Image (cartoon, rainbow, N blue to C red):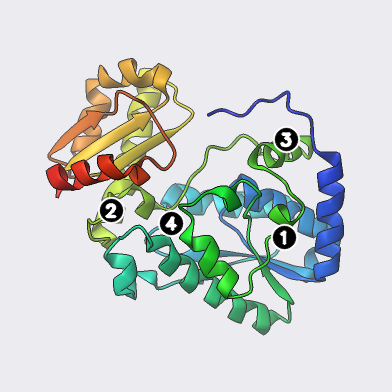
Amino acid sequence: MRPDPDDPAPLDGLAALHRRLTELGSVVVAFSGGTDSALLLAAAVRALGPGRVLAATGDSASLSHRERDGVREIVHELGAPHTFVATHEMESPGYRENSRSRCWFCKDELVGRLVAVAAEHGLAHVATGTNADDLTDRFRPGIRAAAAHGAVTPLADVGLTKRQVRAAGRHWNLRTWDKPAAPCLSSRVAYGLTITRERLARVDAAEQALRDGLRRAGIASYDLRVRDLGRRALIQVDPAAVEAVAACAPALDAVRRTGFASVEVDPRGFRSGSLNETEETREQIGHGS
């Protein structure tokens, strides 16, 4: 859902965030380039100065080329030092088997490596962009994994919700304030289907092909996903764009050419976390494996 540009900035929340970061002293920010981590990084640079902040991005097959390029641009704009940290979640059987706890294995690997990076650079904490809304989501095993490594959550600590994070980002003129959520490529793969580098590369290529095809057709969608259901691809776009996308044969053909036997457009449109819909997931795996 596109954010509301008229939401007032939570100035009290930003002041509290400044105080919280000052208390922490120095941080490695787990930086994905999304709305939450961008606000956290911007706030950390303001509160602590760039010398006591390091943005670190996990670099693996689950990071799309589009997001990797975006990370570089955003960090440069925010004036923070940055490093890509190679992660090896693909070596974990628990990650590859792609159960509902997959994110635990990813964050365990990422935050564990960031703790080592923090020690190497003499920085006191690893901070994630977890916001207050995230703590109410029962499908977030990654949050538990990060907490087990001692990661801190400054946005959630001061009660900033996703809506408030976006409003604060707009107040600070951050380009990410209205950026759509962009979780890792593995989140597109139906539970129970094995995560492989080839599968993630296919999803990455399919989403880029879809974006390019819709742009050429003049069709806009704020949110866009290609869900990997095995041999089938399920496209999810804004509900208002569903009809136009379903009728855009060139875009659908482009997705099919990335390696899917068939392509469908979800008539219900994009829904964040739709693969967590238990009955739907079972049906998808049964028909798509």
**Which marked residue is nearer to the observer: mark 1 or mark 4?**
4
Residue type at mark 2 is Tyr
Asked if marks 2 and 4 touch (Cβ < 8 Å), the reply is: no
Residue 266, quarter of the rendered image: top left
Say which mark, if any, is on residue 191: 2
Which residue is at 68% across, 66% downward? 152
Residue at which label 1 appears: 80
Q: Position of residue 284 (x, y in %)?
A: 21, 42
**Which marked residue is nearer to the observer: mark 2 or mark 4?**
2
In the picture, measured across the screen, residue 49 lies left or right of residue 5, that is right
Q: Earlier in the sequence, mark 4 or mark 3?
A: 4
Residue type at mark 4 is Leu
Q: Residues within 10 Å of mark 3 (few under 14, many from 20)?
A: many
Label 4, label 3: how far apart the Cα atoms are: 26 Å
Q: Position of residue 224 (x, y in %)?
A: 41, 34
**Which marked residue is nearer to the observer: mark 2 or mark 3?**
2
Label 2, label 1: how far apart the Cα atoms are: 36 Å
Say which mark, if any, is on residue 167: 3
Label 2, label 3: how far apart the Cα atoms are: 34 Å
